[in-house]
Image (cartoon, grey):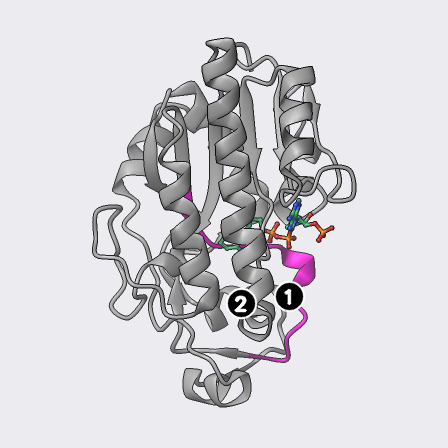
Amino acid sequence: MSNVKNVLLMGGGGNLGSEIIKSKIFKNIYAPSKNTLNLLNQKKIRKILETKKFNLVINCASLARMEYCEKNIGKAIENNIKGTFNLVKEILNYEQKYKKKIKIIHISSDAVYPSTRGNYKEGSSLGPYNVYGWTKLASEFLIKMVEHHVIIRTRFYKKNLIKYKFSASDIYTSQIEIEHLPRYISYLIKDNYNGIVNVGSKRKSDFKIYKNIKKNLKSFKRKDLIKRLKFNIARDSSLNLSKFNKIKSRYE
Ligand SMILES: NC(=O)c1ccc[n+]([C@@H]2O[C@H](COP(=O)([O-])OP(=O)(O)OC[C@H]3O[C@@H](n4cnc5c(N)ncnc54)[C@H](OP(=O)(O)O)[C@@H]3O)[C@@H](O)[C@H]2O)c1
């Protein structure tokens, strides 16, 4: 991409991060592992920003599993909130010191919405329903301090990771196949988009999406899943995509 010279990709070893690398959309991309650059290590973030002179940061780093966040609240707060705090603080310090702007693309979640009635717009009332969602919402507030930011509220799946035997027929989302996201991120950059945007696809039940991939999938109900998980999950987190669809139509 022509206006993007140097990209820092956080979380490059994860599902979405590796998809972004595989897409080859971004040319000069530096994707350190968590061992090389942990968001909890503020000094290292500073050093890498100062030496590599990035003009774009794509942040896919997070504790991204709801069940894990529920069972490890402290770690969820540390990685998802304190980690974002460190990144934002160092970006702002860098911008002030070098009089240069860094754009940040931050991957947030549909879990910041109450996820009961669906068709959420970017301006709808927020109200996360579990620990993960609260940490993602808190991270959004921090990201907004960076002048050039894009916060993507989404949910995605990867075909070969659908291993469940059962799936809920009464949980609705706008989740999207992961392979589309790198391209969609590039549209938002080309469009010079600033702010929050929902990204996803047409509202469907989990069962309907996964049944297409796994023919022997059986359906069950959300209440059975909640009984097993012991924490709250979405009923309908589907997204109003009108903002994003307008942007997409300019490139496809
Ligand atoms: N999966 C979804 O459906 C979904 C839905 C909505 C939003 N999201 C968001 O999308 C983003 C990517 O999700 P994903 O499914 O690709 O997650 P993932 O596969 O779990 O990848 C997350 C990546 O973040 C890294 N990471 C975690 N804590 C870190 C830290 N403190 N410092 C540096 N790196 C750290 C992980 O490193 P290690 O593997 O070494 O721990 C991993 O590479 C996340 O922000 C997630 O919240 C995901």
Q: Can residue 201 be seen by looking at this rendering?
A: no
Taking the spot 58% from the left edge, 53% from the top edge, the residue there is: 79
Q: Can you tell which quarter of the image residue 170 is in? A: bottom left
Q: Amino acid at mark 2?
A: Met
- Residue 49, quarter of picture: top right
Q: Residue at x 63, y 57 (%)?
A: 159
Within-10-Å neighbours for mark 1: few <14, some 14–19, many 20+: few
- Does the stretch in magenta take in 155? yes
Q: Look at discs 1 and 2 and give the one toward the viewer.
A: 2
Residue 97 vs 198, above or below: the answer is above
Q: Magenta segment range?
A: 152-166
* Residue 58 x/y as whole percent: 55, 33
**Residue that mark 2 sits on:** 66
145 w.r.t. 135: above or below: above
Q: Residue at x 63, y 69 (%)?
A: 214
| Crowd around label 2: few <14 · some 14–19 · many ≥20 (10 Å) | some
Q: Nearer the viewer, residue 241 or 35?
A: 35
| Residue in the image at 45% along x and 57% along y | 135
Give the quadrant of the N terminus: top right
What numbered label is drawn on residue 162? 1
Where the C terminus falls, by quadrant? Answer: top left
Tell me: is circle 1 under 8 Å from ligand 1: no
